[in-house]
Amino acid sequence: MRVKLEGYVHLARMIDKCRAVLVGTEGEYIYPCPMDERLLEFVGITSDQFTAAVKTNPADEGVAAWFRQTAKPHPTAELDEWNKKLLARGPSSPESLEKFNKYRDAVDPSRTDLTAWSDLQDLEEGRDVPRRMVIA
């Protein structure tokens, strides 16, 4: 999730999820999910365009080159801020919070310090997520 490709967090993960959907091995992954849609909207690309690019480019480098040529460019400071906001984004409604807590509890109910979807995804996929101090 935090790995940057072409300067964007989530892009590499989105490519992987799209490939999995194309070959029918997505399991519990959802493509396009709300995070995918946020990235695509930010760069002015539709999920259909992105899916077609992934389908016609067997290597990530080809998708990255296509993305670089097609995506609406953003100044570095704006891109950095967008990346930061996406990584910090948490549940935005009571229903979303309920879903977040359900997923978190299935992975590690002791991690009540988690508030961002990106941290939950990293935890779920076995990446280290440092504990944060919970302020009551």
Image (spheres, helix red, strand yellow):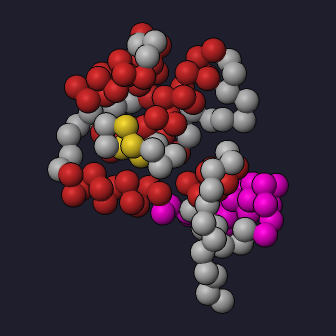
Work out whether residue 37 can be spotted: no
Residue sitting at 46 percent across and 12 percent down?
58
Residue 59 x, y percent position in the rendering: 43, 16
The residue closer to the viewer here, 78 or 92, is 78
Residue sitting at 67 percent across and 45 percent down?
125
Image quadrant of residue 132?
Answer: bottom right
> What is the tally of numbered marks visible in this picture?
0
- Say which quadrant the C terminus sits in: bottom right
Residue sitting at 54 percent across and 28 percent down?
16
Residue sitting at 42 percent across and 22 percent down?
60
Image-based side of 74 in relation to 98, left or right: left
Which SS does the magenta portion mostly show? helix
Residue 129 x, y percent position in the rendering: 61, 60
Q: Specify whether residue 98 is painted magenta.
A: yes
Q: Which residues are magenta?
A: 88-110
The residue closer to the viewer here, 41 or 17, is 17
Image quadrant of residue 64?
Answer: top left
Question: Is 22 rendered above or below residue 69?
Answer: above
Question: Is 64 rendered above or below residue 33?
Answer: above
Question: Is 74 rendered above or below residue 107?
Answer: above
Residue 91 x, y percent position in the rendering: 59, 62
Q: Specify whether residue 45 is painted magenta.
A: no
The residue closer to the viewer here, 69 or 49, is 69
Q: Residue furthest bottom?
A: 136
Residue 73 x, y percent position in the rendering: 20, 40
Image-based side of 73 in relation to 117, left or right: left
Image quadrant of residue 105?
Answer: bottom right
